Image (tube, rainbow, N blue to C red):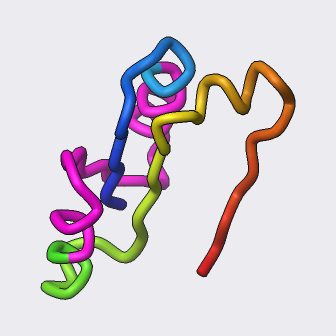
Amino acid sequence: MAVVVEHTSENTNSAVSALRLSSYFVVHPVRTIAEAEHLMAKKEVRAILRFPPHFSRDVTNGDATLLVP
């Protein structure tokens, strides 16, 4: 799974740490969606998880959503 963190925060750090501890995921941190899409095109990852810049604010406000294209 490619993981794109567009703004580092306590919430994103905790989420990424939890993913890394899971035996279900192999986490590939990348800086951009383009990098993540490149890994997916090369079949090096099967999923992309993106934490947008406003993720922590949305979690705090109870407005965080999951989008599955």
Q: Which residue is depicted at the point 35% across and 50% down?
A: 3
Given residues 3 and 23, the one toward you in this image is 3
Compared to residue 3, the image places residue 20 above or below, namely: above
Q: Position of residue 50 (x, y in %)?
A: 45, 52
Q: Quadrant of the N terminus?
A: bottom left
Q: Which residue is depicted at the point 24% across and 45% down?
A: 29
Boundaries of the magenta span: 14-37
Left or right position of 65 against 35: right
Query: As drawn, which residue projects farthest toward the right?
Result: 62
Given residues 2 and 55, the one toward you in this image is 55
Left or right position of 66 against 50: right
Left or right position of 33 against 17: left
Query: As drawn, which residue projects farthest toward the top?
Result: 10
In magenta stretch: residue 28: yes
Q: Position of residue 57 (x, y in %)?
A: 66, 24
Q: Quadrant of the C terminus?
A: bottom right
Compared to residue 40, the image places residue 60 above or below, namely: above
Mark count: 0
Q: Which residue is depicted at the point 43% across and 21% down?
A: 13
Q: Quadrant of residue 63?
A: top right
Left or right position of 38 against 69: left
Q: Position of residue 18 (x, y in %)?
A: 51, 30
In magenta stretch: residue 19: yes
Q: Quadrant of residue 43?
A: bottom left
